[in-house]
Amino acid sequence: MVLFVALVLVLLPQTVCNVSITQCSIRDPIPILHKYYHSGDLIIAGIISQVYIFSNTPSFKEHPSHAPSDDHMYFSSSSIYLASMELLSRRSRLNSNYKCDIENTPVAVIGGPNSQLCFDMAPVLDIYKMPQLIYGTFPVISSVFFHWMFPDVAHQHNGILQLLLHFRWLWIGLITQRNENFEQNIISMFSWKGICLDFIERFPKLTFSNEFNKMVEEGFQTIITVMGSTANAVIVHGEINSIMVMRMLPQVADIEDIPMHSKTKVWIMTAQMDFTSFPFQRGWDMTFLHGALSFAIPSKNLPGFQKFLQMRNPITEKEDGFISVFWEEAFNCSFPSPSLETKYKEFCTGEEKLETLPEMVFEMSMTAHSYSVYNAVYAMAHALHALHSSSFKERTMVNEEKWELLNLQSWKLHLFLRNASFNNGAEELSFDENGELASGFDIINWVIFPNESFLRKKVGRLNLKVPLDKSLSLQDDAIVWPRRFNQVRPVSICNENCHLGYSRTKKEGKPFCCYDCLPCPEGKISNQKDMDECFECPGDQYPNNNHDGCIQKVVTFLSYEEPLGILLATAALSFSVITASVFGIFIKHKETPIVKANNRNLTYTLLISLLFSFLCALLFIGQPEIVTCLLRQTAFGMIFSVAVSCILAKTTIVVLAFMATKPGSSIRRWVGKRLSNSIVLSCSLIQATICIVWLAISPPFPDFDMHSVTEEMILECNEGSTIMFYCVLGFMGLLAIISFTVAFLARKLPDSFNEAKFITFSMLLFCSVWLSFVPTYLSTKGKYMVAVEVFSILASSSGLLVCIFSPKCYVILLRPELNSREQLIKRGGNQV
């Protein structure tokens, strides 16, 4: 875009105009300057004419007003140094540091469509502390005399990052100017957010010297790298002239048969770039930019700007050589020149209309760069006005006499520029504490049409006044994507996302954005794409078959409603009834010899213990509660201890009774009820002590076992202290082993009603059951652990009941003739 705002300032005469400064007002510069330029009556007198603008872009859209004739010199530092010196001299002489005639040297410079220009002009202008309003790319160095008409580039970098994260473009390319500082910062910032670069390419250095072939070769390598990349999003960090280099890429691709259009990228361009081109690029294809996204300084439509452009005429504006050069390049015509050979066959009339030019040649709307220059003019006008209002005195002369103006000193303007806050006719603007324009960025979508026209459509905004994570707002549905994506949002990742149920693992020798996908191991899930690690479900849930979600576990326990619980409960009740029946039989026949011969009290105690042991099994069935958990193991331990101690007492008494029959034996006095009662009470007391200690230090309690069974959450009784639980079992086992040993020794005693043989077999069965219980109990899970213990209780109790009492019941009920004292004496019985 031609910077006509800049041209107006260059066109202004250098002499002071006859107008009262006290009457000046700050209004729209373009219509004001246009009006008074033709009338010869300038507002703000000659002060605005002391502001100059640098531009060095060698295109038919922008040309310097004071530049060497050779095109390649526009990019050289020497031309910038020369222009800087000329600004400090008379218009017709290079006579710096001297003030001649009535001409005034500039007090400020608006410069900088690219960083090199700012870098080169600063050493000369800084000597004179001259304010430099920078509207383009930030130079590598910073100067205290710079005033930025461009927001801090760090905000733009953050905006690019937010844009990539918004679209989840994690695998990108980068084309940049030779700026290592930028590359290091951007790579570090992107890596922190999980974005990595497939390539970093640099723009070929633009030259018109004998190194042109090298530039083309560099461009060729760049296009090969870019088009060969799998990254669909490419950041282009350049300056205003970078677009000219980009426009060469399709030409190089066509020459080398590189399918550029079939591999079109989404170009993400920075705000420093603007559309410009060389004259010979007029008819070149630019559809490769279709769907590009770019950041831009927000610009407004200014009243009077279109009219101002339409009134430009190179015939009447002869003091500015820029317009005539631009006119020739844009309209392919030449102005008659007696000293130079004409470049084009047709002659320019000056009546050509700018609005007839294609948009790729000239845009009638105000672009971001021109709007920045416009704001720079406004900022300088307000600073000068403020400086005048606070520090300058007026001297008024009558009639045709001149004004006498104080000599302005540039350094005085810095404070006023930093504090400038103004309305430019379209919006309110101000500078922040760092001397940077407090503004955000627009997000622009480039739409390219076949007729060499294009549309820059605003699709979003980067607001710097809100938190960073909320600063970017985009209208996704309004974005036009490159044609090869068929209006589907492009994906830019190194490889396909890892699906749910998979985790990613790094590929050796590849950036961290490239990875393999591994299925989650058993017991873990991943419920999002591209998870670094699979994780376990909460305790009350378990993974589904696809390992991409959790399912609620079912609460289970050994209940009365399921077949196993019903079977065990039925068995417990059945054995209880049988035991009660046996007990009734023994009560009914308590006076018979067979009942008397086997110590009725111990027999009754044993039967009652067996009855309670069967009923005790019911405590293990049903939903665990606090009371049932406290009673389960303790009641089981106490009841079985009493039962086994009764058996131990019976076998001990039998052994001692036969030993007492020997002549002169002193053991006779130990045989009796006192010994049997002592054995039962002492053994029961020891077990009771163990249970009391257990309940005191770590009692059982209801708990959920969430890990034993994958799909179930088992409601069970936590034993509290596992050691105390095994102490109860251990003591009971000790009694059983002793009883078995004593019964085994007494198994051959000559008594037809001697219980030693039956007790031996019953204790052998009892010990076998509980020895097998321990490994079985430890190897089962969930409610089946409870079922194993219930089964062991029923099996051991029923074994004692059947082995010890079935022979007696057989005699009592079926062979009553054997249940007599004569039969006992005849068979050598021994009453105890």
Image (cartoon, rainbow, N blue to C red):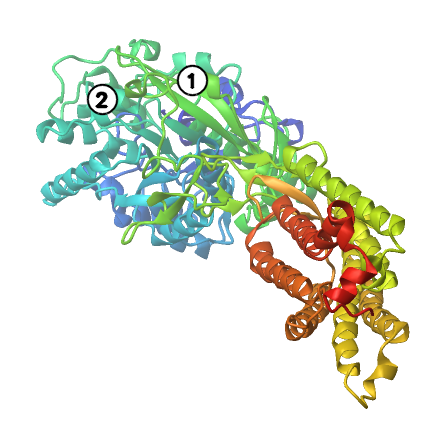
Is residue 405 positioned above or below 371 on the image?
below
The quarter of the displayed image where residue 264 is located: top left
In the image, what residue occupies the spot 26% across and 11% down?
Answer: 450
Secondary structure state at the residue bearing disc 1? loop
Q: Position of residue 410 (x, y in %)?
A: 53, 48
Q: Image check: 52 left or right of 324? A: right
Pointer 1 local density, CA inside 10 Å: few below 14, some 14–19, many at least 20 = some
The quarter of the displayed image where residue 7 is located: top left
Viewer-nearest residue: 258 or 691? 691
Viewer-nearest residue: 286 or 404? 286
Q: Which residue is mark 1?
A: 365
Q: What's the amino acid at mark 1? A: Ser
Q: What's the amino acid at mark 2? A: Glu
Q: Which residue is mark 2?
A: 329
Of the 4 image quadrants, the one containing the C terminus is: bottom right
In the image, what residue occupies the spot 21% across and 34% down?
Answer: 227
